[in-house]
Image: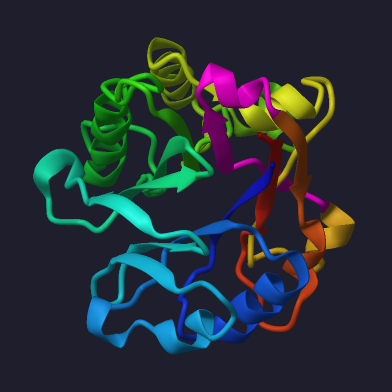
Amino acid sequence: MPFSLATWNINSVRLRAGLVEHFLKSEAPDVLCLQETKCPNDQFPEKTFKALGYEHIAIHGQKGYHGVATFSKRPFEDIVRQDFCEVGDARHLSVRIDIDGKKVRIHNLYVPAGGDEPDPEINPKFAHKLAFVEEMRRMRAGGEPGVSALLCGDLNIAPYETDVWSHKQLLKIVSHTPVETEGLIRAMNEGEWVDLMRRHIPMEEKIFTWWSYRAKDWAASNRGRRLDHVWGSADLADKLAHVTVHTDARGWEKPSDHVPVVARFDL
C-alpha cells in the first residue's frame, strides 16, 4: 500500500495558493503539511484544495504570523492543537488517520526561527526557540499505543554539518549553533524518532530545503540549509521507500524560500 507525506513552509498560503495547487496536481501526496500559513482559520482558502480531492483539512492559524495546516485525502480520526510554551502561537497541529487499518499520528510543526542573535539572555526570540525545542523532548514516536507516528515541518534548525552550505561559517548563526543542533538531536533521540531524510540520503551528501531571499542568485551561490524535516517511528522508517526534496520549487514564480519535501512509503 503506497502512502506519501509532503511538508512545505509556504510563507503565506493565500499569496501562494496557486503554487500549492500546482504541487498537489503534480505530486498528489496523500497528506500535505503546510507551515507559516499566515492566515486566520476563517480566511483559509479551503475550497481550492478540496476541489483537488483534499476534502479533509485541519487548520491552526492566526492573523499575519505562523500557522500550520494539514490536508488529507483520508478523514481525520482525531485533531490536536498544542500551544507550545503557552504563548498562544499557532505552531503545532496533529491528526490521526487510518491507512487501511494502520493508524498513524502526524505532527505538523513550525519551530520559532529565533531571531538573529544566538544569546537567550539578550534575545527573547532565541530563548523562545530553545524552550520550544526543550518542550519537543516530550513528543514520543511511541506515545500512542498501537499508533505509528510521523513528525514533519519547518523545525528551523539544520542539525548536521552536511545540512548547511558551510559548517564553520554558520556555527555562530542561528539555526546551526551547537545549542540548537544538540537540542534538536536530543529531542529526536529521546523521542525515539528516526530522521527519515537522513535514512534515505547518506549523511555525507548535503541536503538543503531553504535558500535566503537575500541571495541575488540562490541557485548559483547555493548557500542553503536543511531546515525542513520528516521524522518517523521505527516501524514507518522500515517502510520508507523514497524521499524527494523538490529544489526546483525555489525557482518558481514568487516562491517560498523553502521547498517541499515528500516522503513515500510502502505500507
Going by the image, does 87 lie left or right of 30? left
* Residue drawn at x 30%, y 25% as measured from the top left: 144
Colouring used for the render: rainbow
Say which of 145 and 44 sits in front.
145
Q: Is residue 78 visible?
A: yes
Q: Looking at the rendering, which quadrant does residue 70 occupy?
A: bottom left
Say which of 102 and 66 sits in front.
102
Q: In the picture shown, does residue 150 fall above or below 138?
A: below
Q: In the picture shown, does residue 7 fall above or below 129?
A: below
Q: In the picture shown, does residue 209 fall above or below 17?
A: above
Q: Is residue 174 visible?
A: no
Say which of 228 and 238 sits in front.
238
* Residue drawn at x 77%, y 20% as measured from the top left: 203
Residue 119 belongs to magenta span: no
Residue 4 horizontal/vertical position (percent): 65, 49
Residue 180 horizontal/vertical position (percent): 43, 26
* Residue drawn at x 30%, y 31% as measured from the top left: 130
Q: Residue furthest right?
A: 220
Bounds of the magenta span? 222-239
Going by the image, does 103 lie left or right of 88? right
Residue 230 horizontal/vertical position (percent): 57, 37
Residue 230 belongs to magenta span: yes
Q: Quadrant of the N terminus?
A: top right
Q: Residue furthest front?
A: 101
The tally of labels here is 0
Residue 16 horizontal/vertical position (percent): 56, 81
Q: Quadrant of the C terminus?
A: top right
* Residue drawn at x 63%, y 80% as measured from the top left: 21
